[in-house]
Amino acid sequence: MQQQIEKIVKDFLNNSGLHTGEVVFEYEEGLNTLWCSISSPDAHLYTGRGGEGLQAINHLVRKAIEKEVSAMAEGLENKNTLSVLVDINNIQKRKIDNLKTIAHMYAERARFFKSSVEVDPMPAFDRRIIHEFLSNAKDVATESTGEGLKRRVVIKYVAEK
């Protein structure tokens, strides 16, 4: 399945007219994510305005994969979803590393004060990274609260049993 997804992404990139350099695929088991890392001298074209271009590319790639994979997966019981992330010049990886640092810092704060700590509002993808990063912590739990643009992660201290 991974080779088929890689082919879909490569075809999308070739047909889209994006100015791409080297394209490298790397599977990250912890997040069940296939990274499509692109080197491009024109990264600024896709990462300006808060990364809207890169988000749009990721959205279109996911839709293309959904269309193809749903046709391939018909009749299969295990439709385990593999996340695919297109990254240009490691911008997404740096963002995720930053979110993990924030999650670690706020979790330490919750532990130190033995209370709940609210993270600033953020998009669903960013909240998911924090939830997954702290999912194995025994003394903190996470939950999302709020609605719309004010939705945020709350990291709660939970006494170890």
Image: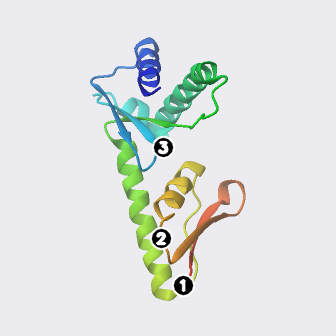
| SS under mark 2 | loop
Between disc 1 and disc 2, whose residue precedes?
2
* Residue that label 3 marks: 50
Q: Could you say which is closer to the camera, residue 62 or residue 135? A: 135
Q: Amino acid at mark 1?
A: Lys
Q: Residue furthest right?
A: 147
Between disc 1 and disc 3, whose residue precedes?
3
Q: Amino acid at mark 3?
A: Gly
Q: Could you say which is closer to the camera, residue 146 or residue 115? A: 115
Q: Amino acid at mark 2?
A: Ala
Report how far apart the C-alphas of labels 1 and 3 lie in the structure: 42 Å
* Residue that label 2 marks: 137
| SS under mark 3 | helix
Q: Residues within 10 Å of mark 3 (few under 14, many from 20)?
A: few
Instruction: Tell me, for residue 161, which label it has, or none.
Output: 1
Report how far apart the C-alphas of labels 3 and 2 lie in the structure: 31 Å
Report how far apart the C-alphas of labels 1 and 2 lie in the structure: 13 Å
Would residue 6 appear left or right of 89 to someone viewing this image? right
| Residue 35: x %, y % from top left | 39, 36
